[in-house]
Amino acid sequence: MNLNKMLCGKSLEDIAIERLKTFEDSAIAKNPKGYYLAYSGGKDSDTILDLVRRSGVKYEAHYHVTTCD
């Protein structure tokens, strides 16, 4: 079984992009600049940034360094 196409035959990336688009109005209602993306430069942040860019939603990325690692 391909884990990337478990839900409705869609890839996990496609599902994430759909969700970003679905909730964009809610994000804009709270902040006219759109989604607030806290970016640390790590692999998780890179993944989210890529999904947000591919989705075409309104967002603003802010560099944040965490000390968790």
Image (tube, rainbow, N blue to C red):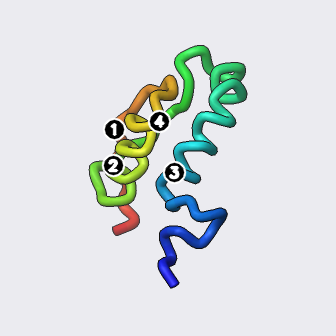
* Callout 2–callout 4 Cβ contact below 8 Å: no
67 relative to 21, above or below: below
The residue under label 4 is which amino acid type?
Ser
Question: Could you tell me which secondary element the residue under label 4 belongs to?
Answer: helix
Determine whether, in the image, residue 35 is placed left or right of residue 62.
right
The residue under label 3 is which amino acid type?
Asp
* Callout 3–callout 4 Cβ contact below 8 Å: no
Q: Assess disc 1: are there few (<14), some (14-19) or many (≥20) residues with their C-alpha within 10 Å of its C-alpha.
A: few
Nearest to the eye among marks 4 and 1: give it: 4
- Residue at mark 2 to residue at mark 4: CA–CA distance: 20 Å
Q: Assess disc 2: are there few (<14), some (14-19) or many (≥20) residues with their C-alpha within 10 Å of its C-alpha.
A: some
Determine whether, in the image, residue 53 is placed left or right of residue 6.
left
45 and 5: which is toward the camera: 5
* Callout 2–callout 3 Cβ contact below 8 Å: no
Residue with the mark numbered 1: 63
**Name of the residue lying farthest toward the left:** 41
Tell me the number on the disc at residue 14.
3
Question: Could you tell me which secondary element the residue under label 3 belongs to?
Answer: helix
13 relative to 60, above or below: below
39 relative to 32, above or below: below
Q: Assess disc 3: are there few (<14), some (14-19) or many (≥20) residues with their C-alpha within 10 Å of its C-alpha.
A: some
68 and 58: which is toward the camera: 58
* Callout 1–callout 2 Cβ contact below 8 Å: yes
Decide which of tag 4 and tag 1 comes sooner along the chain: 4
Decide which of tag 3 and tag 4 comes sooner along the chain: 3
Determine whether, in the image, residue 41 is placed left or right of residue 48.
left
Residue with the mark numbered 2: 40
30 and 64: which is toward the camera: 30
Decide which of tag 2 and tag 4 comes sooner along the chain: 2
- Residue at mark 3 to residue at mark 1: CA–CA distance: 25 Å
